Amino acid sequence: MYDAVFPPDFLWGAGTSAYQIEGAIYEGGRGLSIWDQFAMTPGKTYQGQTGAIAIDHYHSMAADVALMAELGLQSYRFSIAWPRVIPDGSGPVNQRGLDFYERLVDTLLAHGITPMATLYHWDLPIALHQLGGWLRRDTAGNFADYAAAVAHRLGDRVDWWLTINEPWCAAYQGYGDGKQAPGSTDLAEAVIAGHHLLVAHGLGMQAVRAYVRPHARLGLALNLYPVDPVDEREETLRAASMADHFKNRWFLDPIFRGQYPEHLFASWGVEPPPMHVGDAALISQPIDYLGINYYERSVVRAAPTTMGFEEVRGLADATYTDMAWEVYPLGLTRILTRVHRDYAPSLLIVTENGAAYHDVRDTDGTVHDPGRLNYVQRHVEAVGDAIRAGAPVGGYFVWSLFDNFEWAEGYRYRFGLVYVDYQNQQRIIKTSARWFGDFMRAQRLQHREGLVIQQE
């Protein structure tokens, strides 16, 4: 099932984000973010739950990294909280905030774990939001200053960087449908926010490159979906094309082709974003790798909506996670090979892939999660299939390492390889994590033995 298709330098890991795990929102000089405000607003999250404590990683960091080492994690993807580093989003740097991330990086390296740092995972400082947030172009410049401050401190040790995580979510769900912070519901605002996030990516790339080592790799992470029509009628095929433009090409095209898809914004009945001279080149500057976050495919039919389609759920022959996301490993192979074929990035990393299931502790204290175990195994196979098909995939990260605050869903769903008891913060390694750890160790052993054979 798992042959030598994965190269020796393939990155195996798991990921988290700052607001979902750190807690300690009032400690160490941290400022508040739009997610602090959103989660504290009645009715915005499940049972009013917030990330104020989360899994208390801020105080448990050393033990958490030791647990990563116990699992055999090769790489750890984490995000840096902008308001912890620059509390007001611009202005003085909070050295205590940078100290925390420096300790994290040094602890990872001491355990032989490769750090992968994400600079923006949705936690915009509230002070910048009050000035206009991502509707304000200057926020992209503020982001570049923040990125420079982080890279100046950590660039001599961190070689894998992501500027922005899922700009589609930050733009559309944050400003278009209001499901995420800051909770606006204006599609025209989402278009503007999306463009400024891309400008921030471009400026952030330049800022980080000034401080990192020559071999460092920089990119960003997009959430992508293979799109299928629910039937072959002409209007359904047209709806699938519109869905692909909305979910995938809105951000893929400007990054790799220097332009938005033709007629994209007009088809939504909104104006295109305000473009400045040089924006296209800035946004489409070469990246060292593209992070792909994959969870499910999108099956659609035509509908009288702004976007011209609607999602179809409950397919008779499909299985779903607890969040009603379809389990469709072939979709990961398809999206990796499609991006390779249509956009030709030099390297692809699966930066997120995982599933939510209802995990409970057995009477003996263990946590068995056969659904997640099967999910991870099948998606690892799907990555192997993409590599065999020629896609330049260089890494796979499970989402997520720990059960944590799942944004608007609070603590309702569990994505972790590691179970967290939110009452006492106890960590329990799940069955899926045990398998993944054994698999990573087997991969390393396989390559070591192969090297010995070649040397002999």
Image: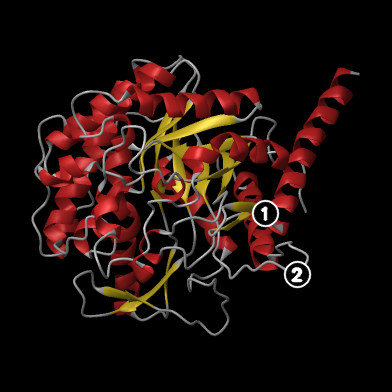
Q: In the rendering, which numbered label is found on residue 363? A: 2
Circle 1: is it few (<14), some (14-19), or many (20+) Cα within 10 Å? some
Residue at (31% x, 32% y) in the render: 29
Residue 371: image quadrant is bottom right
Give the secondary structure at mark 1. strand
> Residue 142: x and y, percent?
20, 30
> Residue 199: x and y, percent?
22, 36
Left or right: residue 67 versus residue 55 is right
> Residue 207: x and y, percent?
29, 22
Residue at (45% x, 42% y) in the render: 291
Amino acid type shown at disc 2: Thr
Which residue matches tag 1? Answer: 428
Give the secondary structure at mark 2. loop
Farthest residue, direction bottom: 316
Q: In the rendering, which numbered label is found on residue 279? A: none
Amino acid type shown at disc 1: Ile
- Residue 211's place in the image compared with 331, above or below, is above
Residue at (36% x, 81% y) in the render: 233
Closest to the observer, 277 or 412: 412
Q: Is residue 348 visible?
A: no
- Residue 55's place in the image compared with 348, above or below, is below
